[in-house]
Image (tube, rainbow, N blue to C red):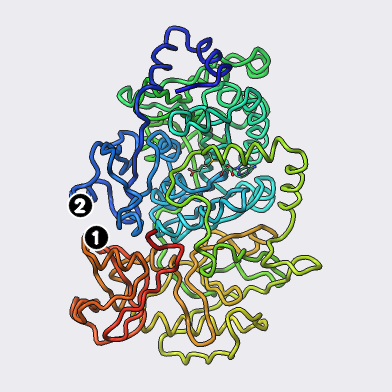
């Protein structure tokens, strides 16, 4: 393939003897993979049960190389059921190296379209908190959708600048991932457009963006917590250089050496590639520590180009604490740390009373963008495409940095409230109501006779809860969502307990938690996100389809189905006499909703979630 001349010259100078092998790698096929969704099942279980998978990616739990050229994993029913994410193998390394454990509070700062976010969510196993953010509004639609497809229940999706998140959250997070916007040199083999668009001034421009992002990200790391910085580019100024400039200004952070097994083929970071200024500002010891970062070269390991550095924020307690299990899992050399991870999963809780200290603010002003809500869930930027920037990402990100007008507009937009919450004169003062879910026996309030699109009076949100309770009693047989329930207008969410609503004030929030559904005039309509986050056993009624059967494809295409009535079964596995919302599952995993009337299954799969 044709590489940009300046890039090739620079790589030849950096790599010396190795350059020939590096350039030869561009004649090899690009690496592709998929990662089984650990929220649903393990990679081993997936491979054993379905005979799919293949060769394991050694550094990624549930990661498999795509070896069959003809295979189209994005066109398999399992993809629609959220059983895996299509992801380039090297891109699976950063989230793996961060050492996330269930219960951690995790921030994914530059997250769209969400490959690493879904991986982090799997590490959390539904416990703790995942705040996932991207400053590009359009891209957060794909992010929210990928979070939902994966069945993530403890994520908050935001569309913010890092500085505004830092102001809102402070040093809340045990783990922070900064998968930074970069010049994307490591993706040239995967996406030739990246090579075509690349310009010699990109690395420096991205480096300036990375410096700003990293400084804000660091403010959000709890003492003793960790930050993983990654790029998919080779140039030192965006890798060791960014870390060196950051460390020079941040004495409370240090590099945690990544001890990757030799068989993975990861190479050490290169402190010797710092500029004299970067090196001088750092001092010899901290400079040498940069060798603890890793470089993933396409001629040395089986993946595209990446860089990752793991940083740790000091804490007094850490000096005496032992090495964490996360270190061992992540292949990170043992060292002391403290985190605020809760050891055990919290039981489901729907009582507002138990969420002490998290009382809704009287004048909460955050509002949820309607962009990703069911009505518009069909709109998305990158569906099913794995992570890492594409040529359009790069152009987007660079466009913001390169065109002063565009940059100013985006900054200004970042200061505005989302359209859904803003009236002409500014932010709408939504009053969030946190409520106890009425018990199944409690009388359900009647609807107010207002359509879902019409504004509701303050307090009318109780009706959302009543309708949800009626829905849950009938269709979910008493199942209760985890976290705290929050009715926001007609929408109902389950909020992770680790965040208070107060902390979301003034942020652009795409999802304040797990979107359960929306109350319409006459009923509660469960969301696709709810379906994807449930298990087949949670539903009172299921239609169980096999991935290979025609009905499964027809369901995914949005067709009305007429299955044999005895295929709609209750929890006991026997034919159900019930009618109404039914969880449609493929190979045992939810794919969406249907409505069963005893003969026909009305297809409730939203257009944006269908097989196209
Ligand atoms: C390498 S991509 C992220 C890929 C993603 N982590 C994944 O695994 O799917 C970098 C992302 O950073 C976002 N970005 C650029 N500048 C940002 C900023 N100042 N704050 C937050 N996100 C930013 C871009 O919109 C882009 O989606």
Q: Mark 1 points at which residue?
A: 547
Residue 50 vertical position relative to residue 468 in the rendered view, above or below: above
In this picture, residue 496 sits left or right of residue 214: left
In this picture, residue 71 sits left or right of residue 464: left
In this picture, residue 402 sits left or right of residue 559: right
In the rendered image, the quadrant that contains the N terminus is top left
In this picture, residue 391 sits left or right of residue 281: left
Residue visible at 33% across and 75% down in the picture: 560
Rendering coords of residue 139 (x, y %): 56, 50
Q: Name the residue under label 2.
A: 50
Image quadrant of ligand 1 equals: top right
Q: Distance between the residues labelled 2 and 1?
A: 10 Å
In the rendered image, the quadrant that contains the C terminus is bottom left
Residue visible at 38% across and 54% down in the picture: 125
User: Element type at marker 2?
Assistant: helix
Residue visible at 63% across and 31% down in the picture: 206
Rendering coords of residue 558 (x, y %): 37, 69
Residue visible at 54% across and 56% down in the picture: 141
Residue 504 vertical position relative to residue 340 in the rendered view, above or below: below
Disc 1 residue lies near ligand 1 with CB under 8 A? no
Residue nearest the observer in this picture, 218 or 10: 10
Rendering coords of residue 117 (x, y %): 47, 48
Asked whether the beta carbons under mark 2 and mark 1 sit within 8 Å of each other, the answer is: yes
Q: Please state which of the two labelled residues, at mark 2 or mark 1, is closer to the viewer.
A: 1
Residue 596 vertical position relative to residue 535 in the rendered view, above or below: below
User: Element type at marker 1?
Assistant: loop
């Amino acid at each position: 393939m044709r590489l940009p001349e300046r890039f090739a010259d620079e790589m030849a100078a950096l790599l010396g003897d190795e350059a020939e092998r590096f350039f030869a790698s561009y004649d090899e096929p690009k690496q592709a993979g998929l990662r089984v969704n650990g929220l649903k099942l393990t990679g081993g279980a997936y491979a054993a049960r379905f005979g799919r998978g293949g060769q394991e990616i050694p550094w990624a739990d549930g990661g498999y190389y795509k070896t069959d050229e003809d295979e189209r994993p994005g066109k398999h029913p399992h993809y629609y059921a959220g059983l895996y994410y299509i992801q380039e193998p090297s891109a699976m390394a950063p989230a793996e190296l961060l050492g996330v454990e269930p219960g951690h509070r995790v921030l994914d700062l530059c997250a769209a379209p969400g490959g690493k976010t879904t991986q982090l969510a799997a590490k959390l196993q539904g416990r703790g908190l995942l705040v996932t953010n991207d400053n590009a509004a359009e891209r957060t639609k794909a992010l929210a959708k990928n979070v939902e497809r994966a069945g993530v229940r403890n994520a908050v999706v935001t569309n913010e600048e890092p500085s505004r998140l830092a102001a809102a959250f402070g040093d809340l997070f045990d783990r922070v991932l900064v998968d930074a916007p970069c010049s994307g040199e490591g993706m040239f083999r995967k996406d030739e457009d990246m090579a075509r668009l690349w310009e010699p001034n990109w690395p420096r421009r991205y480096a300036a963006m990375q410096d700003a992002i990293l400084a804000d990200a660091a403010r959000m790391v709890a003492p003793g917590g960790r930050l993983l910085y990654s790029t998919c580019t080779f140039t030192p100024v965006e890798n060791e250089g960014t870390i060196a400039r950051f460390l020079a200004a941040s004495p409370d952070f240090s590099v945690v050496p990544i001890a990757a097994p030799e068989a993975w083929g990861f190479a050490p970071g290169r402190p010797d590639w710092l500029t004299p200024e970067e090196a001088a500002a750092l001092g010899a010891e901290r400079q040498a520590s940069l060798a603890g970062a890793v470089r993933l070269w396409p001629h040395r390991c089986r993946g595209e180009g990446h860089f990752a550095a793991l940083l740790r924020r000091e804490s007094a307690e850490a000096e005496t604490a032992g090495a964490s299990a996360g270190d061992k899992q992540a292949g990170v050399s043992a060292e002391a740390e403290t985190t605020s991870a809760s050891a055990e999963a919290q039981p489901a809780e729907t009582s507002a009373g138990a969420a002490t200290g998290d009382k809704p603010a009287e004048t909460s002003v955050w509002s949820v963008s309607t962009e990703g809500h069911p009505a518009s869930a069909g709109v998305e930027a990158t569906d099913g495409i794995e992570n890492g920037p594409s040529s359009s990402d790069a152009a987007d990100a660079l466009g913001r940095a390169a065109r002063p007008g565009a940059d100013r507009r985006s900054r200004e937009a970042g200061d505005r409230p989302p359209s859904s919450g803003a009236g002409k004169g500014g932010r709408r003062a939504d009053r969030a109501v946190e409520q106890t879910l009425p018990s199944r026996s409690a009388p359900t309030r009647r609807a107010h006779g207002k359509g879902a699109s019409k504004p509701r009076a303050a307090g009318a949100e109780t009706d959302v809860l009543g309708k949800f309770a009626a829905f849950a009693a009938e269709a979910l047989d008493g199942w209760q969502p985890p976290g705290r329930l929050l009715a926001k207008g007609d929408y109902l969410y389950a909020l992770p307990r680790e965040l208070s609503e107060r902390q979301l004030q003034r942020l652009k929030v795409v999802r304040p938690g797990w979107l359960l559904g929306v109350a319409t005039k006459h009923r509660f309509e469960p969301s696709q996100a709810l379906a994807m986050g449930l298990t087949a056993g949670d539903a009172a009624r299921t239609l169980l389809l096999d991935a290979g059967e025609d009905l499964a494809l027809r369901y995914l295409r949005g067709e009305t189905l007429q299955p044999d009535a005895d295929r709609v079964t209750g929890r006991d596995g026997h034919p159900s006499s019930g009618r109404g919302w039914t969880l449609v599952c493929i190979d045992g995993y939810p794919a969406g909703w249907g409505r069963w009337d005893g003969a026909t299954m009305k297809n409730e799969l939203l257009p944006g979630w269908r097989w196209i």
